[in-house]
Amino acid sequence: QVQLVESGGGLVQAGGSLRLSCAASGTIFSINTMAWYRQAPGKERELVAAITSGGSTNYGDSVKGRFTISRDSAKNTVYLQMNSLKPEDTAVYYCYGDFKVGYGRQGNMRYWGQGTQVTVSS
């Protein structure tokens, strides 16, 4: 029903910046939460940043003060502005969305994007 398409990943030097985008398409009545997760080789997936329907944000400890999540609800799109990038930020970044797609008990559904690679060189 819903597809998440990520873009903006790439290679950047330490200290540089990237902005990731995630556009959701399909039948979406409203957005409950959108978020970014990441997974580095050999590591567990971790929360990077999340933004709720009310605009509240949450960040993983390792990115606080450096990353900013934002959204354009009209476009069902979430962004992740990544500044002061470090080599340890290298990972596949996944977009996540929790959407209201209907009414009743099954009205809320969770979706994942395909992931986009971010590589930070030293």
Image (cartoon, grey):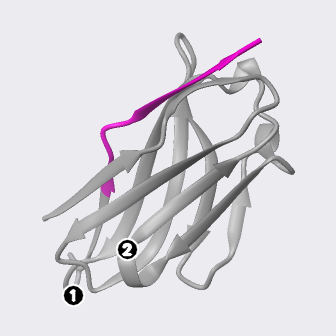
Q: In front of the other: label 2 or label 1?
A: 2
Q: Is residue 88 left or right of residue 117?
A: right
Q: Disc 2 marks which amino acid?
A: Asn
Residue 87 visible in this rendered orientation of the protein: yes
Asked if one can make out residue 45 in the rendered structure from this viewpoint, the answer is no
Q: Residue at x 32, y 60 (%)?
A: 110
Q: Which residue is mark 1?
A: 104
Q: Which residue is mark 2?
A: 76
Disc 1 residue type (three-letter): Gly
Task: Give how far across and how far down residue 39 sits, in percent.
Answer: 52, 27
Q: Which quadrant is home to the N terminus?
A: bottom left
**In the image, is residue 112 part of the stretch drawn in magenta?**
yes
Instruction: Give the residue drawn at x 42%, y 34%.
Output: 116
Above or below, 110 relative to 10:
below
Determine which quarter of the picture holds residue 100.
Answer: bottom left
Q: Main secondary structure of the magenta part?
A: strand
Part of the protein shown in magenta: 111-122
Query: Is residue 80 magenta-colored?
Result: no
